[in-house]
Amino acid sequence: GAVVSQHPSWVICKSGTSVKIECRSLDFQATTMFWYRQFPKQSLMLMATSNEGSKATYEQGVEKDKFLINHASLTLSTLTVTSAHPEDSSFYICSAPQGDTQYFGPGTRLTVL
Amino acid sequence: SQQGEEDPQALSIQEGENATMNCSYKTSINNLQWYRQNSGRGLVHLILIRSNEREKHSGRLRVTLDTSKKSSSLLITASRAADTASYFCAATGGYQKVTFGTGTKLQVIP
């Protein structure tokens, strides 16, 4: 199947700093990618839809100024958590569709101290 | 919330037994997929069933879909200890947006 990678796989940062997470589709192009957040022992919640060449679409309750999304090419979307706080600590996962199937990245664990 | 519901939340069975998980969703869908997730890891795609399909098999997996009830079930037959994981249903609606269920945590005891 198709492969989606994420980088970094884990990151620890200080409160107030910004963190960038990359999501790449390795062997296919994706005009749309999705970003999810998963808190411990909970399900995945869709944060936003990343659209190549245009603005991202954010789900209700997700601050677009805090979670900056850039989809600069057909194989790369980035999520930047700005001015991170401890409550932003979570597992962030991206996905990209190919045909009917969503392919998920391995996730990025963010810990904000 | 548009999140789907899954039951049971947790399931503990003996190796060799069958495990059944149920999922309900809220919106119209194009397809429904099931994923597994080992603790703290990424998602692994298990099986996809389209909205015009009622049942699908893949190895030890059997998935059913009832669009009139907006529900799906995942059956794992002859379970193994390695099947221990969390299982999520994911409903794909318009614009390829995916809404996940709350998940079922399966423990298979050797």
Image (spheres, coloured by chain):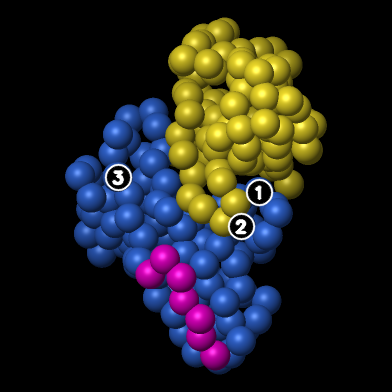
Residue A44 sits inside the magenta stretch: no
Label 2 is placed on what type of residue? Gln
Residue at point 33%, 55% (across, down)? A5
Residue at point 55%, 30% (across, down)? B34
Query: Label 1 vs label 3: CA separation?
Result: 22 Å
Image position, residue B42 (x, y; %): 48, 50
A8, above or below A51, in the image: below
Image position, residue A55 (x, y; %): 39, 62
Image position, residue A26 (x, y; %): 23, 50
- Mark 3 and mark 1 in contact (Cβ < 8 Å)? no
Query: Label 2 vs label 3: CA separation?
Result: 20 Å
Residue numbers of the magenta segment? A8-14
Chain holding disc 2: A
Chain holding disc 1: A
The residue where tag 1 is placed is: A43
Residue at point 61%, 87% (across, down)? A113
Of all residues, the one furthest to the front in this rendering is B110
Q: Nearer the viewer, residue B42 or B26?
A: B42
B17, above or below B99, in the image: above
Query: Label 1 vs label 2: CA separation?
Result: 6 Å
Tell me the SS state at disc 3. Answer: loop
Mark 1 Cα-neighbour bin, 10 Å: few <14, some 14–19, many ≥20:
many
Image position, residue A70 (x, y; %): 35, 67
User: Chain B's colour?
Assistant: yellow
Give the tally of numbered discs.
Answer: 3
The disc placed on residue A3 is 3
Asked if residue A11 lies left or right of residue B1, the reply is left
B62, above or below A86, in the image: above
Mark 3 Cα-neighbour bin, 10 Å: few <14, some 14–19, many ≥20:
some
Residue A83 seen in render: no
The disc placed on residue A38 is 2
